[in-house]
Image (cartoon, rainbow, N blue to C red):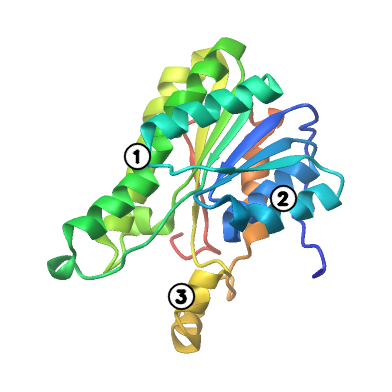
Amino acid sequence: MAKERTTGLSADLSGQVAMVTGASRGLGKAVAIELARNGAKVACVARDAQKLEETVSEITQAGGEADALACDVKDRSSVSKLVDDIVEKWERLDILVNNAGITRDTLLPGMSDEDWDDVILTNLTGAFLFSRAVSLHMMRARYGRIINMSSVSGVMGTAGQTNYSASKAGLMGLTRSLSRELAGRKVTINAVAPGYIESDMTKTLGDVVIQEAKKRIPAKRLGTPEDVAAVVLYQASPAASYVTGQVLVVDGGMTG
């Protein structure tokens, strides 16, 4: 197994239960592992539960507890049942990380209805469905943390990603509005907006594009999944009780 990469931060999440969508790879995997490393039991969610085996294995081998759960984040009934099942098994649900997301990149004149719908339904509607289902339990418990994975594409827009940028900007609006509804119940809702992060998706851009991207980043490097996981860990921790409705950009200064 490759050398473990951690954020270097710590928070006491002992006894808490977290759910991370899109946890099979990349940012979702890093976040799930980081939350487990800090004591949370983690429900790892993806469309294909088999793809979660590596994430769950890393968590359990390190002494943590995690489940691999299959769910289509666009399916309303499946989302509600999954949340209820988790609460029934672990008797609580303290942290939700809405990370599941897809891209269907193309310029707008050539974008099909399906390209638009798939991205909006997965990236934005999925987060709405999970947040709605989870918020009911969190409100009753008078405690909760919801973290939405947005993107700098939602901050400044990206050519060829009208659907993706709209979905990520929508997540920021969801975050800010819902935070006003739930703050009185001690439930916080925040978002993270990553820039260029080392991932399988980034690798497909090719070396030339990546080198050009680095020139626009004051930090002169791509971010790592652990850079993002560190922010999520803070937002998920008890220490962030007075932080809600915020979008924290993690992009090495690119949009600064």
Q: Residue 4 vs residue 252: left or right?
A: right
Give the Cα distance between marks 1 and 2.
26 Å
> Which residue is label 1 attached to?
125
On screen, 143 above or below 204? above
> Which residue is label 3 attached to?
216
Q: Look at the image and tell me in which quarter the N terminus lies.
A: bottom right
Residue 57 spot, x, y in % from top left: 76, 54
> Which residue is label 2 attached to?
56
Dot 2 and dot 3 residues touching (CB under 8 Å): no
Give the Cα distance between marks 2 and 3.
36 Å
Judge whether residue 242 can be spotted in this image.
no
The residue positioned 38% from the left and 38% from the top of the image is 75
| Amino acid type, callout 2 | Val
Q: Residue 181 vs residue 66: left or right?
A: left
| Amino acid type, callout 1 | Thr
Earlier-in-chain disc, 3 versus 1: 1
In the depicted view, which residue is nearer to us: 218 or 208? 208
Q: How crowded is mark 3: few (under 14 residues within 10 Å), some or many (20 or more)?
A: some
Q: Residue 212 vs residue 69: left or right?
A: left
The residue positioned 52% from the left and 61% from the top of the image is 251
Name the element at disc 3: loop
Name the element at disc 2: helix
Judge whether residue 141 can be spotted in this image.
yes
On screen, 68 above or below 223? above
Quadrant in the picture for residue 68: top right
On screen, 64 above or below 254? above
Residue 239 spot, x, y in % from top left: 70, 30
